[in-house]
Amino acid sequence: MGDCMDIKEIGALVRAERVKQGFKQQEAAGFLNVGTRFLSDLENGKPTTQIGKVIAVLEGLGYELVPVPKGRQKLLRQVKASLNER
């Protein structure tokens, strides 16, 4: 599947970013308006039905789910332009 991230990698990314931003898990859950249990499950790579289905559908359609920092607007514009050319 190439460079596509799986749920464990997404969870690790979420955890690393939360720690980098100085949030404890409970604080981050409140800020993000999700439950602490959900955030814990996500960070631990627990496959949920919803995210698993989304990833499976995207992969099945030939797409990859790739998180891009909001500050990378130029990159996002290039990706969107490329998609519009199809």
Image (cartoon, grey):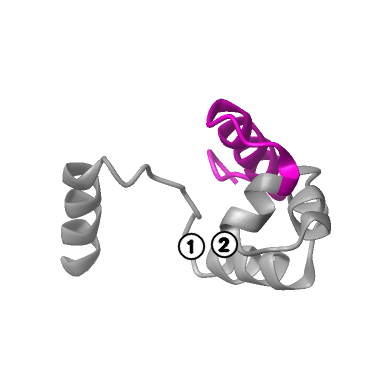
Give percent across and percent down for residue 37: 83, 57
Q: Quadrant of the C terminus?
A: bottom left
- Image quadrant in which you'd find residue 25: top right
Q: Are marks 2 and 1 in contact (CB under 8 Å)?
A: yes
The residue carrying mark 1 is: 62
Asked whether, in this view, residue 54 is left or right of residue 43, the answer is left
Q: CA distance from mark 2 to mark 1?
A: 5 Å
Figure check: 71 above or below 36: above
Between residues 72 and 27, which one lies in front from this camera angle?
27
Give percent across and percent down for residue 85: 16, 65
Is residue 22 covered in magenta? yes
Amino acid at pointer 2: Glu
Which residue is at 25% across, 53% downward?
79
Asked whether, in this view, residue 82 is left or right of residue 38, the answer is left
Neighbours of disc 1 within 10 Å: few (<14), some (14-19), many (20+): few
Is residue 20 covered in magenta? yes
Number of dots carrying numbers: 2
Between residues 21 and 14, which one lies in front from this camera angle?
21
User: Element type at marker 1?
Assistant: loop
Figure check: 39 above or below 25: below
Which residue is at 78% across, 71% downward?
49
User: Element type at marker 2?
Assistant: helix
The stretch in magenta equals: 1-26
- Image quadrant in which you'd find residue 22: top right
Give percent across and percent down for residue 70: 32, 47
Which residue is at 50% across, 70% downward?
61
Neighbours of disc 2 within 10 Å: few (<14), some (14-19), many (20+): some
Which residue is at 58% across, 54% downward?
31
Amino acid at pointer 1: Gly
The residue carrying mark 2 is: 59
Q: Which secondary structure type mostly characterizes the magenta part of the structure?
A: helix
